[in-house]
């Protein structure tokens, strides 16, 4: 008899290098006022050339493990959501496992771009429910700076680097599941609206198409994710959406109807960190005490592939 799973701890990591709007105004034809008004971002963190994405992931994972009071030997599965790994093998999860000294885990990468973390979290939850994992490390990590065209003023103002992680464990018998059923899907025919393509790979998007999709189609889907957990949007203590753009987050949060919820706005200080954005923002809410243990939180990722995935989780 297998039970549901829960998040027992979270952690996050951002590189030390800060890139401000003023810095960007010196690189491309833009301004602080333009960036603030269009995307709501004030600054972002950029990793150095000697900081690969698995290093960002490893730092966040180590923090989450420490917060859970767990050791690397307690972990039997590592799932990393990323779309910016340069090497195909060993994958990012295997490299994180090697960095942390995790013995013999199932190690897989999940590439669903900006919806990656919520897909990875669902995958770990399903593995625990199926009895094939007892404690999983789920990480969202992206080094967007490495796939950015720094001369393209429409995209370079958006991106940042970082990582966030969660420890997922089986619930005790009789304990309510702490990770609700996932609602996931995609719009494959619109997949080209967000791209990381070519050699070298470069990030590009059709901003207006993405904005329309996110503000018109996604609110109903996010509400359905709440319904799957048996909650009304008004019951949510927090909403953590993919941190794409403040002009997407605020209307989407309002249309979900989560009137009592703290809305994560980490995009302001971190930019769009792709798969890292949701666990990074969640970990900061926990660290600052803006949500407390047991609080219901909607996580909802969307973007690349025009994929989406959302679930309600209980705050660790």
Image (cartoon, helix red, strand yellow):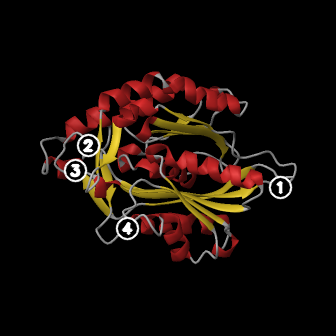
Q: Is residue 211 left or right of residue 49?
A: right
Where does label 2 land, which residue?
155
| Residue shown at 21% from the left, 36% from the top | 33
Label whose residue precedes the other's in the sequence (3 or 4): 4
Disc 3 from disc 1: Cα separation: 48 Å
Q: Is the Cβ of the residue at disc 2 closer than 8 Å to that at disc 4?
A: no
- 71 w.r.t. 13: above or below: below
| Residue shown at 19% from the left, 49% from the top | 24
Label whose residue precedes the other's in the sequence (2 or 4): 4
Q: Is the Cβ of the residue at disc 3 closer than 8 Å to that at disc 2?
A: yes
Numbered circle sitting on residue 172 = 1
Q: Position of residue 138 (x, y in %)?
A: 58, 57
Q: Secondary structure at mark 4?
A: loop
Disc 3 from disc 4: Cα separation: 18 Å
Q: Within 10 angstroms of label 2, few (less than 14), some, or many (20 or more) residues?
A: some
Label whose residue precedes the other's in the sequence (4 or 1): 4
Where does label 4 land, which residue?
52
Where does label 3 land, which residue?
149
Disc 3 from disc 2: Cα separation: 7 Å
Disc 2 from disc 4: Cα separation: 21 Å
Question: Viewer-proximal residue, 53 or 237?
Answer: 53
Q: Position of residue 115 (x, y in %)?
A: 49, 43
Q: Position of residue 65 (x, y in %)?
A: 61, 67
Question: Viewer-proximal residue, 293 or 273?
Answer: 273
Disc 1 from disc 2: Cα separation: 45 Å
Label whose residue precedes the other's in the sequence (3 or 2): 3
Q: Secondary structure at mark 1?
A: loop
| Residue shown at 60% from the left, 27% from the top | 223
């Amino acid at each position: 008899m297998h039970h549901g799973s829960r998040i027992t701890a979270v952690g996050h990591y951002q590189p030390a290098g800060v890139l401000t709007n003023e810095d960007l105004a010196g690189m491309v034809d833009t301004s602080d006022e333009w960036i603030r008004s269009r995307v709501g971002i004030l600054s972002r963190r950029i990793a150095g050339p000697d900081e690969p994405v698995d290093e960002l992931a490893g730092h966040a994972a180590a923090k989450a493990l420490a917060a859970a009071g767990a050791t690397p030997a307690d972990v039997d599965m590592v799932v990393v959501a990323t779309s910016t790994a340069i090497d195909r093998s060993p994958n990012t999860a295997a490299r994180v496992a090697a960095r942390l000294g995790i013995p013999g885990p199932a190690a897989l990468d999940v590439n669903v771009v900006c919806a990656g973390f919520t897909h990875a979290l669902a995958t770990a939850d399903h593995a625990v429910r199926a009895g094939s994992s007892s404690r999983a490390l789920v990480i969202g990590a992206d080094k967007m700076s490495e796939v950015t065209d720094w001369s393209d003023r429409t995209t370079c103002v958006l991106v940042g680097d970082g990582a966030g992680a969660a420890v997922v464990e089986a619930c005790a018998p009789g304990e309510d599941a702490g990770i609700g059923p996932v609602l996931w899907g995609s719009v494959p025919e619109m997949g080209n609206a967000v791209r990381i393509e070519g050699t070298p790979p470069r990030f590009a998007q059709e901003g207006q198409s993405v904005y329309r999709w996110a503000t018109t189609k996604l609110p109903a889907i996010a509400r359905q994710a709440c319904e799957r957990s048996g909650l009304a949007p008004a019951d949510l203590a927090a909403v953590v959406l993919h941190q794409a753009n403040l002009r997407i987050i605020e209307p989407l949060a309002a249309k979900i109807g989560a009137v009592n919820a703290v809305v994560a706005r980490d995009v302001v200080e971190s930019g769009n960190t792709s798969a890292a954005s949701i666990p990074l923002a969640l970990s900061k809410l926990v660290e600052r005490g803006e949500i407390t243990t047991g609080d219901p939180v909607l996580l909802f990722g969307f973007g690349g592939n025009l994929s989406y995935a959302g679930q309600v989780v209980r705050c660790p």
